[in-house]
């Protein structure tokens, strides 16, 4: 019997890992604008990235729909109509499939393909990429578009393997859905995901027990169907929407007020908070300019939201647990919700404080805390992700002289502008640590990164340059800038935040995103390019 012929290595100009918002736009730019040979490798069975996997009950975007989209093409902005203020997961998936089909992107995407390794060959100046199925590719440029929130963080609780019921992680949700009817359900985690899922699960579960380690602020989303008038306004104002998202620190289509909470009279300040609460959404944090830089100002917002919790939740003991929040408002990702606090008024919902009585074991029957046992049929882990670095470090990425990315980042991520890592030539990270990424409306950050990378590659090719990587001194300076930007805010005070990697045991405590604002960051990147890619070594 003859052996099958060895699979031929496919040679490319560029290889992209991931087919979410980042990977789709990067493919379009490199293939259609620069004319490169490009392949996208995607683990999932379709486009969507994070949204392909996050199908949990209540999964919804927390950026307003008219700004949670690509803005590179005005015609695309006008032709797509969102149905709600905050789009649900299925609608976002329909949008991304529309984009992929409109620009004929799927023909260059290989689905159900997980990258196992990516090794740089210095002599050939090529990245050698191998999939888990054994396929091999080489490319001059390797672009990771793996998303910031794509590696599920399942907590290592003893006994999970003995649980007789079913368990799920919100970031790896079954496509067929989960029926909670008549079930005793436990949800572990009350971050953004838990806050979205808990009210929906409570509607059908026989009983829902919420296991809360860290109490959280949340503001009503006030989600509504979009009116025809608003849809018309979006079509007529695409340029203004694009301008606003590019001019604001967080990439949202609204500007932060210049008012200071500390100098606003108490009654007026309360009225402004009330109006912002009624309007709902992330715009609440734009009520005053000083909320994220002045603890005294932040305390006023924190007290207002705690007051709302006490007003909404009828059981005083439950309200006290929900309002026992240990960090400044918006120092962690600020959730928005639909009836989250109201859900605790349901007779079939109970709250367990696992900071006071930690989870010790998962038994075949349910969850055991220090204070007792909770019988469960289903456990839902809303415990978030190994954010920002996790998706990169789970791959075997090796740069010059076999340097493993995991070793280069052993003490935390170190790169330049969140775009490149010293010792890893021609490797680009879209919205990597060290960039605004998760502190921003993601499509805005993604478009800026993709366009910068595309222009950089065009610059290299036009000058017959083979490679680019950051100077180690530039990396040191940028890491210092990222730390300075964070320390100028209240963000580092949330010591349990996934911004710091605190939700993953053993992960270095390093503040990962750039907190200096998206508009300022955009200017920094533009200036670096205009000065001949200052801080990078081109050869």
Image (cartoon, grey):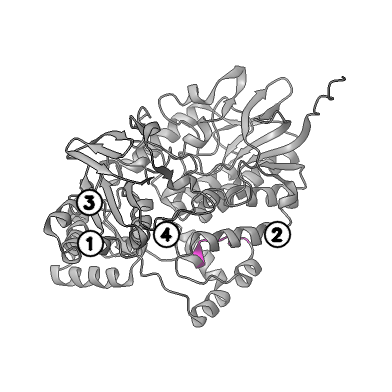
> Camera-side residue: 253 or 136?
136
Pointer 1 and pointer 4: residues touching (CB < 8 Å)? Answer: no
Name the quadrant of the C terminus.
Answer: top right
In magenta stretch: residue 530: no
> Camera-side residue: 312 or 496?
312
User: What SS does tag 4 mark?
Assistant: loop
Magenta span of residues = 66-72
Q: Which residue in the structure is indicated by mark 3?
A: 351
| Nearer to us: label 1 or label 2 | 1
Q: Position of residue 287 (x, y in %)?
A: 29, 65
Q: Tell me if residue 385 comes above or below residue 77 in the rendering.
A: above
Mark earlier in primary sequence (2, 4): 4
Q: Which residue in the structure is indicated by mark 4?
A: 58
User: What SS does tag 2 mark?
Assistant: helix
> Camera-side residue: 4 or 288?
4
Mark earlier in primary sequence (3, 4): 4
- Marks 1/3: CA–CA distance: 11 Å
Q: Position of residue 445 (x, y in %)?
A: 51, 51
Residue 408 as seen in the image, left or right of residue 29: left
Mark earlier in primary sequence (2, 3): 2
Residue 293 appears in the rendering: yes
- Marks 2/4: CA–CA distance: 27 Å
């Amino acid at each position: 019997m003859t052996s099958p012929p060895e699979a031929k290595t496919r040679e490319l100009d560029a290889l992209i890992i991931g087919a979410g918002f980042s990977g789709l736009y990067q493919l379009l730019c490199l293939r259609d604008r620069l004319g490169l040979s490009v392949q996208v490798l995607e683990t999932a069975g379709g486009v969507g990235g994070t949204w392909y996997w996050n199908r949990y009950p209540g999964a919804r975007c927390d950026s307003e729909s008219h700004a949670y989209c690509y803005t590179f093409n005005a015609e695309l902005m006008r032709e797509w109509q969102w149905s709600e203020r905050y789009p649900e997961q299925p609608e976002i998936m329909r949008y991304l499939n529309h984009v992929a089909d409109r620009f004929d992107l799927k023909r260059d995407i290989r689905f159900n393909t997980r990258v196992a390794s990516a090794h740089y060959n210095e002599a050939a100046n090529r990245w050698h990429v191998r999939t888990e199925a054994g396929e091999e590719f080489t490319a001059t440029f390797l672009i990771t578009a793996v998303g910031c929130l794509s590696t599920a963080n399942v907590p290592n609780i003893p006994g999970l393997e003995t649980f007789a019921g079913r368990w799920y992680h919100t970031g790896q949700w079954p496509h067929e859905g989960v029926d909670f009817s008549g079930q005793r359900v436990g949800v572990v985690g009350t971050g953004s995901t838990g806050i979205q899922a808990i009210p929906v699960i409570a509607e059908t579960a026989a009983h829902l027990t919420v296991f809360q380690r860290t109490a959280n602020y949340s503001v009503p989303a006030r989600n509504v169907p979009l009116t025809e008038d608003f849809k018309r306004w979006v079509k007529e104002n695409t340029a203004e929407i694009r301008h606003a998202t590019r001019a604001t620190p967080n990439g949202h289509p609204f500007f932060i007020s210049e008012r200071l909470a500390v100098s606003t009279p108490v009654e007026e300040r309360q009225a402004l908070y009330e109006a912002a609460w009624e309007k709902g959404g992330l715009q609440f944090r734009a009520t005053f300019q000083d909320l994220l830089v002045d603890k005294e100002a932040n305390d006023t917002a924190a007290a207002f939201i705690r007051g709302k919790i006490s007003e909404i939740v009828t059981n005083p003991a439950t309200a006290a647990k929900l309002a026992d929040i240990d960090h400044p408002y918006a120092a962690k990702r600020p959730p928005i919700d639909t009836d989250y606090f109201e859900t605790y008024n349901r007779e079939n919902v109970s709250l367990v404080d696992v900071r006071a009585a930690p989870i010790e074991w998962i038994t075949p029957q349910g969850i055991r805390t220090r204070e007792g046992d909770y019988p469960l049929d289903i456990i839902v882990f809303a415990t978030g992700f190994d954010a920002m670095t996790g998706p990169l470090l789970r791959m075997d990425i090796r740069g010059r002289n076999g340097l493993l990315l995991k070793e280069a980042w052993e003490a935390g991520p170190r790169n330049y502008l969140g775009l490149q890592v010293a010792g890893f030539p021609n490797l680009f990270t879209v919205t990597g640590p060290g960039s605004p990424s998760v502190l921003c409306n993601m499509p805005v950050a993604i478009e800026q990164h993709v366009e910068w990378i595309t222009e950089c590659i065009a610059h290299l090719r036009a000058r017959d340059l083979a490679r680019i990587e950051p100077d180690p001194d530039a990396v040191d300076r940028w890491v210092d800038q990222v730390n300075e930007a964070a320390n100028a805010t209240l963000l580092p005070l949330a010591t349990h935040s996934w911004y710091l990697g605190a939700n993953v045991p053993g992960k270095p405590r390093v503040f990962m995103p750039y907190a200096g604002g998206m508009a300022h960051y955009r200017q920094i990147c533009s200036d670096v390019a205009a000065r001949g890619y200052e801080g990078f070594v081109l050869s």
